[in-house]
Image (cartoon, rainbow, N blue to C red):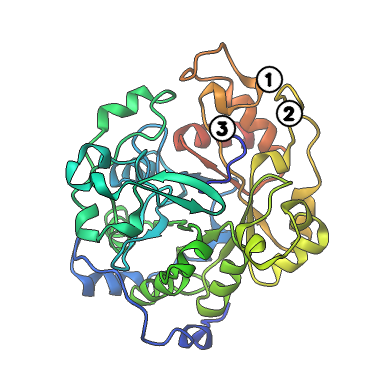
Amino acid sequence: MGTQESNEETSGTGRRALLGAAVLGAGGAVLGMAGTARADGARHGGGGFKSLPKPTIIGHRGASGYRPEHTFGSYQLALDLGADIVEAGDLVPTKDGHLVCRHEPEIGGTTDVADHPEFADRKTTKLLDGVSTTGWFTEDFTLAELKTLRAVERIPANRPHNTLYNGRWEIPTFDEVLRWQDEQTRKRGKQVWIYPELKHPTYFRKQGLPLEERVARLLRTYRKDRRSSPVILQSFEPTSIQRLHKIVDNPLVVLLSSAGSRPWDFVETGDPRTVADLVKPAGLREIASYAQGIGPTLDLVVPRDAQGRLTTPTTLVADAHRVGLVLHPYTMRNENPFLPADFRKGTDADAYGDVFGAYKAYFATGIDGVFTDQPDTGLLAREDFKG
């Protein structure tokens, strides 16, 4: 899930044929033989994503409330805690064209790169979707170089306990994630679902590192590019989802940030519409022509007042359902700073508030699922809600 967080049945052979053979695929042999992985990749998710439990509990960057995000430690724990889907992969490219899993292309806050003197000269300032950003960027490293780094906790002030695991895990590639998915499906005897996000597609396309074709090529390799495949793809850029719609048949989701914001691809192309326009009935109908769902910030479902307390739900859930879209809002977190003010307990930044009360309020709106940093809490909340 992405930067813009406001609270803190056809096979489609024709589409896939559009890819051609000129796209660089990510490599790296891990977690079993490639032939086995491809064979197991042919197993699909039964009745598709609509057959998943409701409300669906999606492990946000794994179980990132308990382990550094986007690591196999975090992904594995999300499955162990019972998550219905794991958001395995905020996908960004390396200099040599591989796809890796990082919250952002800037990795100063999620890896130990600052402790590597050999990479000190890679620190730079770039304009990332209009924002001046200083740090180290994945596109300036080869995969081999990134594999020398280790992941660290991104928000230690809120999760000091997660720093215990700093340095334990390396940066996963998307290829490794797809193999891990197959391995876990075999071991558990149950289809494992993943929910990768394409990060900053316009930014990377302008650098000659387009994401959509790389993602599609890997999905084709593992036979996971079909409508019933256990891989849901998401992006904050509607044109990226439209591009994916032409080359894969996976379920697709448009992420939606705060109402007044504009998707960066809209900024680049001069499209004047904001998210507020996209969540109107006409905007939702357009999204439904190429996607199966939306991932709105929770504030688009239930706004907050000036004091940060929940107010009256909007009509977004009903409007989206009317045109056949599912809603998977983001992000539920147990810690006080991320909860609506009326569900906080005390003022400690790492203390838990009344998160079960918050879940109840959001589930009552009829949302189809939710991204959460603590999947076990989400599952208990669902159990409470369903009675």
Considering only order in the chain, which callout, 1 or 3, is on the residue closer to the N terminus?
1
Residue shown at 61% from the left, 68% from the top = 239
What label does residue 342 carry, if any?
A: 1
Real-space Cα separation, disc 3 to disc 2, in angstroms: 18 Å
From the image, tell me which residue sits under label 3.
381
| Residue 203 percent location from the top left of the image | 50, 62
What label does residue 310 carry, if any?
A: 2
Q: Secondary structure at mark 2?
A: loop
> Looking at numbered disc 2 in the image, what kind of residue is underneath it?
Leu
Residue shown at 77% from the left, 62% from the top = 283
- State yes or no: discs 2 and 1 in contact (Cβ < 8 Å): yes
Q: Is residue 232 left or right of residue 154?
A: right
> Looking at numbered disc 3 in the image, what kind of residue is underneath it?
Ala
Residue sitting nearer the eye, 378 or 203: 203
| Residue 145 percent location from the top left of the image | 20, 55
Real-space Cα separation, disc 2 to disc 1, in angstroms: 7 Å
Can residue 365 be seen at all in this image of the molecule?
A: no
Q: Is residue 243 left or right of residue 158?
A: right
| Residue 266 percent location from the top left of the image | 66, 62
